[in-house]
Image: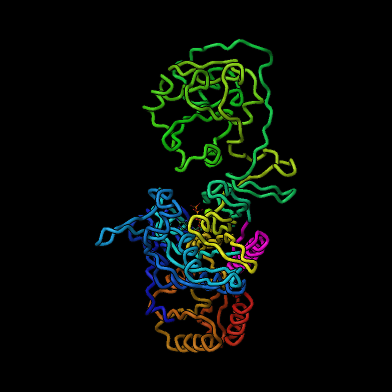
Amino acid sequence: MRMSKLLMPTLREVPAEAEITSHKLMLRAGLIRKLSSGIYSYLPLGLRVERKIEQIVREEMDRAGAQELLMPALLPAEAYQASGRWDVFGASMFKLKDRYDRDYCLGPTHEELFTQAVIDNVRSYKEYPMTLYQIQHKYRDEGRPRFGVIRSREFVMKDAYSFDLTEEGLDESYKAMYDAYCRIFNRLKLDFTIVDADSGAMGGSGSQEFMVKSPVGEDGIAYCDFCGYAANFEKAECIPTEVDCVEGDLAMEKIHTPNVHTIEELVDFMNAKPYNFVKTILYKADDKYIAAMVRGDRDVNEVKLKNLVGCTDDLELAEPHIVRQLTNAEVGFAGPVGLDIPVYADKEVELMKNFIVGANETDMHYKNVNMGRDFTPHTVADIRTITSGDACPKCGKPIKTAQGIEVGHIFKLGTKYSKALGLTAQTETGEEKTVIMGCYGIGVTRCLAASVEQNNDENGIIWPVAIAPYEVSVVPVNAKNDEQVKMAEEIYEKLLANGVEALLDDRDERPGVKFKDSDLIGVPARIVVGKKCGEGIVEYKLRGEANAVEMPVSEAIESACKFINENK
Ligand code: ATP
Ligand code: MG
């Protein structure tokens, strides 16, 4: 490709809308442009990368025996109504009506449709097991679209669904996808971790997520360097730890705590430690209210709590006027004593003695509170988020935590959708079996951003060869020097003839601009034709290395071809 013809609107300035590196660089390098909140266009360079990721995904899915098909994105409501997800998706589903007032949605994920496709098209039990997939746009009206294509409202997903007649069959189909995912993310050169994931809310028996560790990741992951345990925060089981408490059977006492609103202020005021307090947090769970209690230095894990409560919608913090109504106090003074809604206490609270809680009265706290004696929780369970240093639930050694970007998710669904929609198969012996399913997703466009997040420096993107928009750029330093231009053209042609995806910077720009652009868009190798052109010498430089090396033209071409082939 000749850069003079390439639509590549690079930006020198950092766009104000972008918070994280990958988003900034994808805008600056002219890969994507925002059309509306969470909705992006892919310009030529971005689309090339996206297509290459798709292709790697496709090759590995095919290799694992999955078959590609393509469903519509505009979907009639019926199948989602039958599964109950028409309501469960709530506000995150884009719903619309046609001219006859019939309900449709833009597909957020396709379990229902694939189940229906198998009902409609599979005639014999002999056709099982089967794994089907598509690579397609998905639509979710995310509450907080952000970070560019990491959390967008229209994105490309590869979604696959397996259909088996036995549990062992599901295990095999799942394993085949697990292996394919490892190959895919390795080929994408993503540094990833596989974590156990929560499967509570969706039902099913097992689930794992493929996470790219990154400080900007929105998911918390806990991992153990000693035994290899890894789970996301929703799944990671917390082992309760005991802390120093005031000993003895002390009477509960009400304390006046004026102008104290935060745990920190309370710690100072009471001259105690954060772990001597218990926080009581009020939530809206569907149409009722509940309270959650965790130690002062802990956080409630809302997904664990949601699964425990068994509600459909995500938990929401109770609004201030509701808190006032339920506690008869300003926000910040809720406590379990005398509270008239179900209280869910974390297991650690059970180990504490004589602790401090809000007194359900403005500016008042209770001290010397004891569970069982002063209040009785509805449920005691693990409802907190694991923290670094907690005991590993598998081996007991200190756990570590990190943030991760979820790029893939594999899930043993079981019979949730086949039961809801009626997918059965009659076996040889005439037995009617409900088909057992798995589902497997990869965020194709999210992978693009995750790769940029992991591969960049102060000058721009450093693409791995396998997904680089172009593989080698050829830069004549002076566009007005005929000799340089001619040599650059020759190198460009030779690279193309060798099957290398080459870029020729034939723009009449200053060398500085050309080098900056080439670094910014992250082309893995570069050949610069400059002053020593007359002697047949050029500069060869890899994007990931600091220095350029001078060498004869033929050697540079050879090196570039070799480097590209070895790293594809
Ligand atoms: P998240 O927890 O990040 O919202 P999810 O668990 O809802 O994602 P899945 O339903 O498991 O997502 O979808 C499969 C994959 O699709 C995810 O692993 C992720 O890589 C990608 N994905 C999900 N939502 C988005 C989004 N809003 N934008 C881009 N990619 C997404
Ligand atoms: Mg997921």
Residue 391 against residue 414 in the figure, above or below: above
Q: Is residue 238 above or below residue 27?
A: above
Direction left: furthest residue: 99
Q: Residue at x 47, y 69 (%)?
A: 120
Residue 306 visible in the snapshot:
yes
Looking at the rendering, the stretch of residues picked out in magenta corresponds to 165-193
Residue 192 magenta-highlighted: yes
| Left or right: where 351 falls relative to 319 | right
Any part of residue 523 in sight: no
Residue 494: image location, x then y, percent: 53, 88
Q: Quadrant of the C terminus?
A: bottom right
Q: Residue at x 59, y 78 (%)?
A: 564
Identify the residue shown where x is 47% and y is 30%. 282
Q: Work out whether 415 lies above or below 65.
A: above
The one nearer the camera, 44 or 226, is 226
Q: Quadrant of residue 481?
A: bottom left
Does residue 58 belong to the magenta stretch? Answer: no
> In which quadrant is the N terminus drawn?
bottom left
- Quadrant of residue 500 in the image? bottom right
Task: Tell whether 480 sits left or right of 248.
Answer: left
